Every structure is written in structure tokens, then in C-alpha cells.
Amino acid sequence: MNKLLIVWSTEEVEVAKKMVLLYGSVILPRGYWDEAHLMIWGPSARALAQNSELQDMLKTVQESGVETSACVVCSDDYGVSEKLGALGVKSIHTGEFLTEALQNDWKVVTF
């Protein structure tokens, strides 16, 4: 099974729009990957919570079947955990998930 973990950590909106969320929205429908997960880590959590265009794009990603999560420490520090939860993003200990992915058969890309 081909699995991809996208780690999105940049607050740069254009990178989010033109790479992370654009690619994330097509990877499952086009059959590029069998399973995909978008991990929101660091300043990307704040950017997502504050930007309605990114939120709309995230919804498209989620509707395509890509799972989403956010670093609970980061989202709590930025005060955006509740907002991300309302967007359907689970707050987790991302270090555990990333370590498991790296130690198993996931491909990992970071932005």
C-alpha cells in the first residue's frame, strides 16, 4: 500500500495554496496514493485558523479522503485548537505519528 504523509509547517500562504492544499486535494482522487494524511504543524496551524481561503481548500482535501491532524502543542500555544477542531482537524501528538510513519512504510514530504 502506498501511503503519503504531508507535513505542513510553513506559514507561507502561497506554499499552502499552490503546493500543500492543491496537491493534497488531488492525490487520492487521481490514484497517486492509496492513503494520505496531512499533518499541520507549527505556524501552519495559525495560518489555517486565520485564513478562510485556506480553510475552504482544506475542506476539499478532507472531502477527497485525506485525513488531517494538527500538533496539539502548537495549536494550544497559538490558541487555535478549538478553531481547528471545528474544521475537522484532530489535535494529536504529531511527533508520535511522524515517528511511526518514518519507521514504517509511509513516504513523507515536508513543506
Image: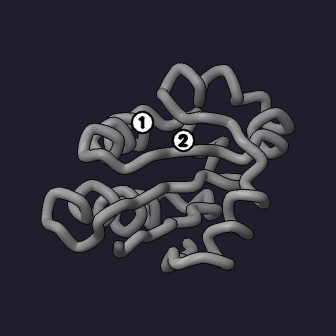
Measured as percent of width and height from the top left, residue 87 is found at 48, 27
Determine which of the numbered discs, if any, sits on residue 48 in the image. 2
| Residue 19 position (above or below residue 50) | below
How many other residues sit within 10 Å of disc 2, few (<14), some (14-19) or many (≥20)?
many
Q: Amino acid at mark 1?
A: Gln
Q: Amino acid at mark 2?
A: Leu
Measured as percent of width and height from the top left, residue 52 is found at 42, 32
Query: Colour scheme used in the picture?
Result: one colour
Mark 2: secondary structure: helix
Measured as percent of width and height from the top left, residue 106 is found at 51, 75
Query: What residue is at 41 percent from the left and 70 percent from the top?
Result: 3
Q: Pointer 1: what residue?
A: 55
| Residue 2 position (above or below residue 17) | below
Q: Quadrant of residue 75?
A: top right
Measured as percent of width and height from the top left, residue 22 is found at 29, 60
Q: Quadrant of residue 34?
A: bottom left
Q: Give left or right: position of 87 versus 80.
A: left
| Residue 96 position (above or below residue 57) | below
Disc 1/disc 2 C-alpha distance (Å): 6 Å
**Are the two marked residues, 1 and 2, in contact with CB atoms closer than 8 angstroms?**
yes
Query: What residue is at 35 percent from the left and 75 percent from the top?
Result: 2
Q: Give left or right: position of 74 versus 82.
A: right
Mark 1: secondary structure: helix
**Screen quadrant of the N terminus:** bottom left
Front position in the image: 21 or 105: 105
Query: What residue is at 59 percent from the left and 25 percent from the top?
Result: 85
Pick out the residue farthest to the left.
30
Sequence order check, earlier mark of 1 and 2:
2
Determine which of the numbered discs, if any, sits on residue 47 in the image. none
